[in-house]
Amino acid sequence: MHMADMGKFKLHYRIDGPDDGVPVVFANSLGTDLRLWDPIMPLLPAGLRILRYDKRGHGLSDTPEGRYSMGALVGDAEKLMQMTGFKDAVFVGLSIGGLIAQGLAAKRLDLVKAVVLSNTAAKIGTRDMWEDRIKTVEAGGLEAALEATMTRWFSKKFRQTPDYPAWENLHLQTPVAGWVGCAAAIAGTDFISSTSGLRLPALGIAGTEDGSTPPDLVREMTDLIPGSQFHLIRGAGHLPCVEKPEEYAEVLTGFLKSQGLV
Ligand SMILES: O=C(O)CC1=CCC(=O)O1
C-alpha cells in the first residue's frame, strides 16, 4: 500500500507488474475503490505495469473537505501519474473514472495514448438529478441511497450471488463527504465538446443492464471519437468488470492487442 502526497491530502495507490511493462492506469467509479478492478486483475496479460488508485474521498485516500471539481479530479490523476512515472499510458476509466479519462486525454496526450471509456458518458445525468442525490445522501447517509444505487449498479441475477454483499458494503463504507464531493464534480461536468475533439485510440464498453449510463449513452459518447471501438456486455449492469470479468478482460486485452501493446 502506498500513499502519494498531493500537498494538502494523500491518495492511496498501488502498482502491479514489471517496471518496464506497458503502462495502464485504472480509475474507478463513484462509491468504489481500486478493488473494483480485482476481479479482472488475474485475467489480464502478463507484461502490463498497472497503476490503480482511490480517488479523493474514497477507499484509503484522504477526504478533503468541500465539493470537488472535475478539474481537481483530473489534476489528481495527472499528478499521480507524474509522481509514479506513468506516461504514454492506456487509461481505463469507469463511470466518473471515464470522465477523468476524457478530461485527462483532452489535457495531456503525453500521459494518455489511448482510452477505455467504460460505463460512462461525456455528461452523466443532469445537475438537478445529482443535487437531489446529494441531498438524499447528506440527510440519510449512503444507506439512504443504497437500494437505488445497487439497482443501477447490478443486474438482478448478480444480486442473488454470494459475491454481491461485499459491493453493498463497499458503497456503504464510502465517506459521505467523499461521495458528495465527487457527485458534485459529476454534476458540473459536460465534456461533449472536448471529447468531440479527442483524436486517440478509444474503446467504449457498456452493459445492457446499466441503470446509470445505459448503452445508448455510452455509444453516443464513443461515437464522438473518430475510429473508436465499442463493445456491449450482455447481462451486466454498471460494473461489468465485476459481473462479467472474463468478458471484460478479453475485450480489454483485445483492445491492447489492436494497439500492438501486448
Ligand atoms: O449511478 C451511480 O450511482 C453510479 C455512478 C454514477 C457516476 C459514477 O461514477 O457512478
Image (cartoon, grey):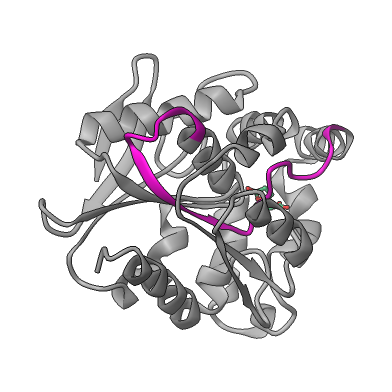
Q: Which residues are magenta?
A: 106-127
Is 144 part of what is drawn in magenta? no
The image quadrant that residue 206 belongs to is bottom right
Q: Quadrant of the C terminus?
A: bottom left
Query: Which residue, as the protein is rendered here, is positioned at the far front?
Result: 226
For the point 34% across and 26% down, the residue is 79
Query: In the image shown, does 210 or 202 lie closer to the viewer?
Result: 202
Query: In the image shown, does 262 or 237 lie closer to the viewer?
Result: 262
Tell me where residue 55 appears, x and y as whole percent. Answer: 47, 38
Query: In the image shown, does 15 or 89 lie closer to the viewer?
Result: 89
Residue 107 against residue 53 in the figure, above or below? above
Instruction: Tell me: 232 left or right of 212.
Output: left
Residue 34 in view in this figure: yes
Tell me where residue 168 appears, x and y as whole percent. Answer: 62, 62
The image quadrant that residue 154 belongs to is bottom right
Tell me where residue 67 appears, x and y as whole percent. Answer: 65, 22
Instruction: Tell me: 125 left or right of 20.
Output: right
Query: In the image shown, does 122 or 208 lie closer to the viewer?
Result: 122
Tell me where residue 72 appears, x and y as whole percent. Answer: 52, 23
Residue 34 against residue 46 in the figure, above or below? above
Residue 143 against residue 66 in the figure, above or below? below
Is 116 part of what is drawn in magenta? yes
Query: Which residue, as the protein is rendered here, is positioned at the far top?
Result: 8
